Amino acid sequence: KINNQKMMMRDPNKDILFTKMERLPDIMRCVYNYFVSEKKPYLQLDNVCEKVKHSCLPDLTLDQIQEHVLLIQNHIPEWLEIVNLHEERYVGIKNTKYNINDAVTKIKECICKLKLV
């Protein structure tokens, strides 16, 4: 009964954020694999989002996937970088501080913290 009351009193925005955060580890792996296959330091954000959509999240729109990529960048700016160049947005992965496994672990820690709130 207490859990049901907590569920009803939860902030819907936190539920939406939690749902997005749960998708991030898979999206991160997709983004990382795309960078490995392309062998380039920066890729256009639109192309990255399109690749993620076709690879692992066909139900989401490109705008929703872009929100997820921006969420990754907000939580781990040391790993994922977004830069503007010639009115285009580019994504870069910085492997110097975090490798993919460390980055996924950090996101999972953020998910656990969010779950506890």
Image: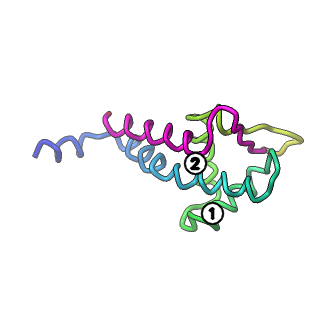
As for residue 110 lying within the magenta part, the answer is: yes
Instruction: Please check the rendered image and state whether residue 97 is part of the magenta-colored stretch, yes or no.
Output: yes
**Residue beneath the point at 62% across and 36% down:** 98
Residue assigned mark 2: 68
Query: Whole-percent x and y of residue 53?
Result: 63, 63
> What residue type is disc 1 on?
Lys
- 88 left or right, relative to 33: right
- Vertical position of residue 20 compared to residue 56: above or below: above
Image point (56%, 63%), residue name? 57
Label 2 Cα crowd, 10 Å radius (few <14 / some 14-19 / many 20+): many
Is 28 placed left or right of 85 in the picture? left
The overriding secondary structure of the stretch rendered in magenta is helix
Q: Depth check: give the residue in front, 89 or 35.
A: 35
Give residue 16's position: percent from left, percent from top: 43, 47
Q: Is residue 116 above or below residue 67?
A: above
Q: Secondary structure at mark 1?
A: helix
Q: Position of residue 72 (x, y in %)?
A: 58, 41
- The residue lying at 79 percent from left, 57 percent from top is 38
98 sits left or right of 22 in the view = right
Residue of label 1? 53
**What is the magenta range?**
90-116
The image shows residue 58, relative to residue 78, as above or below, that is below
